[in-house]
Image: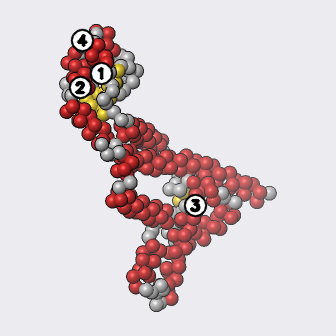
Amino acid sequence: MESLTSWILNSQLKTIISIILIILFIYYIYHRAGSGYSLFSRIWNLISGEKNFNHSDLQSLVHDRNDIERYNVVFNGRATSIKQIKKFKIWYEKYDISLKEISNAKGWFDIDRLKITTPTWPVHLCILSLSVSTLILTLFFTTLGVRNSAALTFKSDNSTFWIDSHSAKNIFPHYLPFTKNSLNWEITPEQCSKFPEPTVKFKSASGMNDEQIKIICASFTSAKQQLFIKETIRKQKYLLFFAAGLLLFLIFLIVKLSRMLSSYDARNMIRRKVHEYMTQHSL
């Protein structure tokens, strides 16, 4: 059986992973900058060999776009014009606004109106529910990927269990409401040989019937079933890549949730700073 480590170190797979990482990095810069003008400008410079526009007005436009993208990347902003940036600079210097808190609330700061818009509770609930669901799925697929046991299901009643050459045991803990087993259980080849007929107590604890238990016991001695189990375990390793994708999505949701919560701090900070300024200059 091919190990997951050797599969990951395969040269073709390394190339694919490298390409994916490069694409993700470019997308991150593009998303943070708000546009890809400077990136495409550099690509065109390499192709054409020309760095500047022939007309000074067009070259000035390039400088403006580069400054806008640099501002968005450095300050985590969403500016679309130099006018907005200049207006923002005057505003934050006047009221001594914290750039860090504004940056943390990216997506909720309107640079055109210089105001923070806070998310509504349905948005909070949606992002939080999606985060919890993604976390559960990530843990589930990670568990399937790292275990050296096959996760199999009986077609008759959809009972799911772990099995390998040494034992079979329940997947889900007995205290979950949807499980059929009243206790955590385990079957080994030794138990199958000593007790060919399952006890009433074990059947009650596992939630399985005589036929299902006999099928599990037969799997320990069947070469065909053992081969099937090993192949299933090998295929389960691929789920780690799916879990990695879910993990990236979970990180995205956590960052989104963090920025949503930061929007309240930023809003309160702006109100406090404006109030302090108005108080000082009204005396």
Q: Which of marks 4 and 1 is in front?
A: 1
Q: Residues within 10 Å of mark 3 (few under 14, many from 20)?
A: some
Along the line of sight, which residue is nearer the eye, 84 or 174? 174
Q: Which residue is drawn at 30% across and 29% down?
A: 165
Amino acid at the residue labelled 4: Glu
Dot 3: what SS? loop
Q: Pointers 1 and 2 in contact (CB under 8 A)?
A: yes
Q: Residue 221 carries which label?
A: 2
Image coords of residue 266 (percent x, y):
61, 52
Q: How far apart are marks 3 and 1 (CA)?
A: 70 Å
Q: Residue 197 carries which label?
A: 4
Q: Which of marks 3 and 1 is in front?
A: 1
What residue did someone put label 1 on? 189
Q: Residue at x 49, y 62 (%)?
A: 32
Q: Which of marks 4 and 2 is nearer the N terminus?
A: 4
Q: How crowded is mark 1: few (under 14 residues within 10 Å), some or many (20 or more)?
A: some
Image coords of residue 68 (percent x, y):
53, 71
On-image quarter of the N terminus: top left
Q: Is residue 230 above or below residue 266?
A: above
Q: Earlier in the sequence, mark 4 or mark 1?
A: 1
Dot 2: what SS? helix
Q: Which mark is residue 114?
A: 3
